[in-house]
Image (spheres, rainbow, N blue to C red):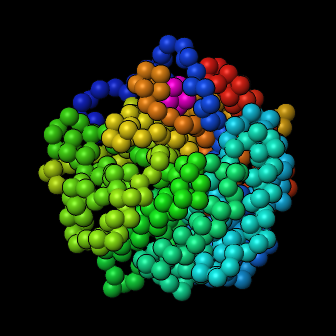
Amino acid sequence: METTTAADVALESGGSATFESRSVAGPASPGMPEGFLWGGAVAANQVEGAYLEGGKGLSIADVQTPGAHGVPREIHDHVREGVYYPNQTGIDAYHRYKEDIALFAEMGFTCLRTSISWPRIFPNGDDAEPNEAGLAFYDAVFDELLAHGIEPVITLSHYETPLSLVTRYGSWRNRKLIDFFVRFCETVFTRYRGKVRYWMTFNEINEVMNKRLPFNQAGLVFAEDENPDEVKVVASHNMMVASARAVLLAHKICPDYKVGCMIQYTPTYARTCRPEDVLARRLNIMPNYYYLDVMARGRYTGLCRAQLRRLGVEFEASAEDAAILAAGTVDYIALSYYFSCVASSETGDDLTVARNNPYLERTDWGWPIDAVGLRVSLNELYDCYQLPLFVVENGYGAHEEPGAGGVVEDDERIDFLRRHIAQMERAVNEDYVELIGYTTWGPIDLVSCGSGQMEKRYGFIYVDRDDAGNGTLARSKKKSFDWYRRVIASNGREL
Ligand code: BGP
């Protein structure tokens, strides 16, 4: 585990570091409300593999090479001979899902968040008819989950846009994708009625504006003569209109469907109490609320217009689109929460954002560990929108190997999750935040989205596979497996 040093951030307060584990102790938790959903979250492209089986087309995940901590993944526009692409094989869940689901059931999961791979259903994205083999595969997966008392929670687009839509249409910068996506939604909403209740449209939609992942999220590659910010604004709009149409359609097909948006929420702290730093904090969270305002409030608010102004992009939704956005607001807000960040400014206009916070320890990948930040996030979001929340990703990625007894002793993961769940419970029981459920990211080791590595491990279940694709793919329980089983069995009372 990395520890932030004083040299990482020159703390104006001059105070010494007080690690969070010493300051979060609270009263014993009364646990979570009745019916609270407990489980884990994965994405099709990070676990399934079988990238061309059963009629599946290529997704944008299938053409990304492995990277490493600090080394970005390469993105190719086609599959190159002799190159290893980790998502193409994933952890072979396409063939091993029964074994995996049995393990999730042993831990007592009441839900599993996963995605339906869009190119498994529409291999090119714009096909006239869906691929029956793909639909049948998810029938089998959902039936298996339900037979084990596990409710599927489904992401419609989790960083796996059909590659063909990127190469032939320019991806989400093109309005045609709205209709293609809605056709995909209509197909799966109709097919899985009675099997699925909770849906979410785009995984971490706010990542479109993020510098890190515009390709993963929206399939965007920028031409030299393009202004990336302009393209991101247009692509975001198209996605939000598609999302609103999906919400309307879902409610029409099945009034019991609940459809959420999903964002990566990274709460921002002002580096000091200098007013300029406090303003910088505000400016840094604006892109998150840009998406949430449109998807939850149903309109481009003043905050959205201010964000556009900051980007220097002129954009106006048509009256027709504005009506769709207003009608198709989401039923709940799902979030991933991993860490917080720190913002500062010299002038009030510029903005410097850092992950280094001298009060926090960091993971092997340099991600700050901030359990209290989860409570902060839940409060901020609930205050703003008064909609039910769903924590659909939270987890600890680390290098791990089985010890002498063949078991991974992942005490750090247990400690991480224990502290986060404790804060989540305080948000619910003391702050009265309405929360649907909690799914840890990567209940089984899988291919990392950011780095493409297997060795950034998140699971309660170890998978024997390395970054080069070697290993038997055998599954084995880590120490945290039993710990999480007890957490769920006690509905969060026993941490
Ligand atoms: C989120 C993604 C996930 C997942 C997770 C962990 O941003 O929704 O797909 O991968 O982050 O990130 P990483 O895999 O880069 O460690």
From the image, which quarter does the C terminus lie in? top right
Q: In this rendering, does residue 285 appear at all?
A: yes
287 or 481: nearer the viewer: 287
Q: Main secondary structure of the magenta part?
A: helix
- Residue range (magenta): 419-425
25 or 323: nearer the viewer: 323
Does residue 276 lie above or below 71 as drawn? above
Say whether residue 449 is left or right of residue 322.
Answer: right
Say whether residue 182 is left or right of residue 265.
Answer: right
Residue 490, image x, y percentages: 67, 21
Residue at image point 45% right, 52% down? 330
* Residue 474 on the magenta span: no
Quadrant location of residue 50? bottom right
Quadrant location of residue 104? top right
Residue 3, image x, y percentages: 48, 37
Say whether residue 418 is left or right of residue 92.
Answer: left
Say whether residue 282 is left or right of residue 365.
Answer: left
Residue 121, image x, y percentages: 69, 71
Residue at image point 58% right, 65% down? 185
210 or 150: nearer the viewer: 150
Residue at image point 53% right, 41% down? 391
